[in-house]
Image (cartoon, grey):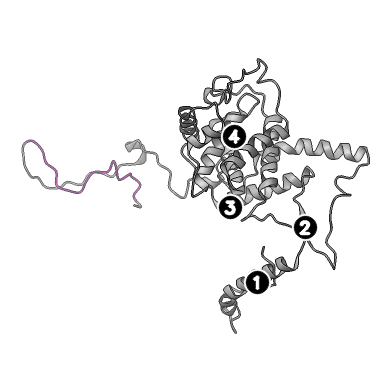
Amino acid sequence: MGNTTSCCVSSSPKLRRNAHSRLESYRPEAELSREDTGCNLQHISDRENIDDLNMEFNPSDHPRASTIFLSKSQTDVREKRKSLYINHHPPGQLRRKYSSCSTIFLDDSTVSQPNLKYTIKCVALAIYYHIKNRDTDGRMLLDIFDENLHPLSKSEVPPDYDKHDPEQKQIYRFVRTLFSAAQLTAECAIVTLVYLERLLTYAEIDICPANWKRIVLGAILLASKVWDDQAVWNVDYCQILKDITVEDMNELERQFLELLQFNINVPSSVYAKYYFDLRSLAEANNLSFPLEPLSRDRAYKLEAISRLCEDKYKDFRKVAKKRSVSADNLTVVRWSPAIIS
């Protein structure tokens, strides 16, 4: 394994056979260099870290890469804040609720159980910024996503269907209709956005007025099958969208998977990144999650969850609190009580 030559090109140490003699003595050959073998493989220590390659272009694969929708929304957010500052209208100051000594306000959305309605609103807002701030470098439009070639309804597609950007409410209604009819979860909405950005990155295409519906439909179709245990069948979507055929849904799913290079894995770190970036997007656009006063029942529930976590890590505390430790690996473990929702 440590030789400089590849195992595929080095000669075998077994005895050789030829046409004149059935068996001849083994004669070791001279060691070949990398140049002689034509196999200039890098040593493993010389290779670049795969996680660092094209990280900024693969946010759906790497947890440290910034999401595309958040970067596309920055320009609009800065302009909106500038306009509010000029007009002396502080954003959301009157509607915002603050906790006090007597009342604590919490929202019911967590990374493990997001709020369905507001998660769909945030995903629709992210898609809206994708369409609005798309690149205008003339990227190709794939036929499978073109709504003129594959319409979702029998109504005539207007001639300027690819000219007008959809409003955020229109995107929200389309996504909400599919999620309500198929009874999908909020986690599926986050995975849908992951697949959408992965498609745009892998296929090097942009989402635009001509293809956004079919791209979103394909992402929802795939996310529902990967995430939910009881997946919605393709024929079920034909009951939701009355004018689409099963063959069209099958072809959409097949080509979507091929463009993703069959990479449907969503690590938990990537999922958490998209969840918190969606919350940041909501806060920047005054789309706050609903805050409710902390009730007595929920306080008892949070206290019970904290007690379970405390008992779970009690053994780790005992290990950490040794009477003596080595000065070579001196670490100070500090524990503080926390409420885990």
| Amino acid bearing label 2 | Glu
For discs 4 and 3, the disc positioned in front in the rendered view: 4
Residue 239 position within the rendered picture, expressed as x and y whole percent measured from the top left: 53, 33
- Look at the image and tell me in which quarter the C terminus lies: bottom right
Helix, strand or loop: magenta stretch = loop
In screen coordinates, is 318 left or right of 135? left
At mark 3, the secondary structure is: helix
At mark 2, the secondary structure is: strand
What's the distance in space between the residues labelled 4 and 2, CA to CA? 32 Å
| Residue that numbered label 4 is attached to | 216
Residue 3 seen by the camera: yes
In screen coordinates, is 10 left or right of 166? left
Q: Looking at the image, tell me whether mark 1 or mark 4 is earlier in sequence order.
A: 4
| Residue that numbered label 3 is attached to | 269
At mark 1, the secondary structure is: helix
Mark 4 residue crowding within 10 angstroms, few (<14) / some (14–19) / many (20+): many
Residue 273 position within the rendered picture, expressed as x and y whole percent measured from the top left: 63, 49
Residue 145 position within the rendered picture, expressed as x and y whole percent measured from the top left: 55, 26
- Which mark is drawn over residue 292? 2
Res. 80 image quadrant: top right
Magenta stretch bounds: 3-19
| Amino acid bearing label 3 | Ser
Residue 55 seen by the camera: no
What's the distance in space between the residues labelled 4 and 3, CA to CA? 23 Å
Residue 92 position within the rendered picture, expressed as x and y whole percent measured from the top left: 85, 47
What's the distance in space between the residues labelled 3 and 2, CA to CA? 28 Å
- Which mark is drawn over residue 304? 1
Mark 1 residue crowding within 10 angstroms, few (<14) / some (14–19) / many (20+): some
| Residue in front for this viewpoint, 73 or 25 | 73
